[in-house]
Amino acid sequence: MSVAVVEAVRSIPKYQDINLRVKWPNDIYYSDLMKIGGVLVNSTLMGETFHILIGCGFNVTNSNPTICINDLITEYNKQHKAELKPLRADYLIARVVTVLEKLIEDGQQVHLGSADGPKVSIVGLDDSGFLQVHQEGGEVVTVHPDGNSFDMLRNLILPKRR
């Protein structure tokens, strides 16, 4: 869900450089500086049916108490002499749901470590909730959030720098 929020903004033509990031697994950040949203997920298994309730909040137009997506757009416009329009909350919510459906349907391919690193497909979560990726050789690997971050702009999972 957090990937869908970031991708919903950054997949709009000319908005790809708006500095939104995912802090895996559930936070939406401006760069690596400030949280502007998050996701809570509750799941229940009833018989053979798995129910998931996703709660997601992200600041689109409200600057207080921290910052919002439209503040990032305003700052981008100043720095790049651009004229990107602010986003409406209803428009962005619709885009997020559409992107989420596509991510679920298609899966996501990323590179591990660098742009030249091995290409993997995100396949799900392990029993502890860690991200799992499928390597080209057929092996499924767990990526732990305490050592990795996800860079949507470069489509990478990067080792965390300490």
Image (cartoon, rainbow, N blue to C red):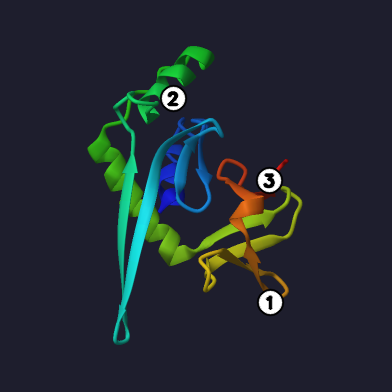
Label 1 – label 3 distance at C-alpha = 25 Å
Residue 38 locus on image (x, y percent): 39, 45
Amino acid type at mark 2: Leu
The quadrant where residue 117 appears: bottom right
Secondary structure category for the residue under label 3: loop
Q: In the rendered image of this protein, does residue 93 appear above or below residue 138?
A: above
Label 2 – label 1 distance at C-alpha = 40 Å
Residue 50 locus on image (x, y percent): 33, 77
Q: Please tell me which of labels 2 and 1 falls first in the chain.
A: 2
Quarter of the picture holding the C terminus: top right
Tag 1 residue: 138
The quadrant where residue 48 appears: bottom left
Q: Are marks 2 and 1 in contact (CB under 8 Å)?
A: no
Q: Residue at x 72, y 41 (%)?
A: 161
Secondary structure category for the residue under label 1: loop
Residue 79 locus on image (x, y percent): 52, 14
Tag 2 residue: 72
Q: Nearer the viewer, mark 1 or mark 3?
A: 3
Q: Residues within 10 Å of mark 3 (few under 14, many from 20)?
A: few
Tag 3 residue: 160
Which one is in front, 12 or 72? 72
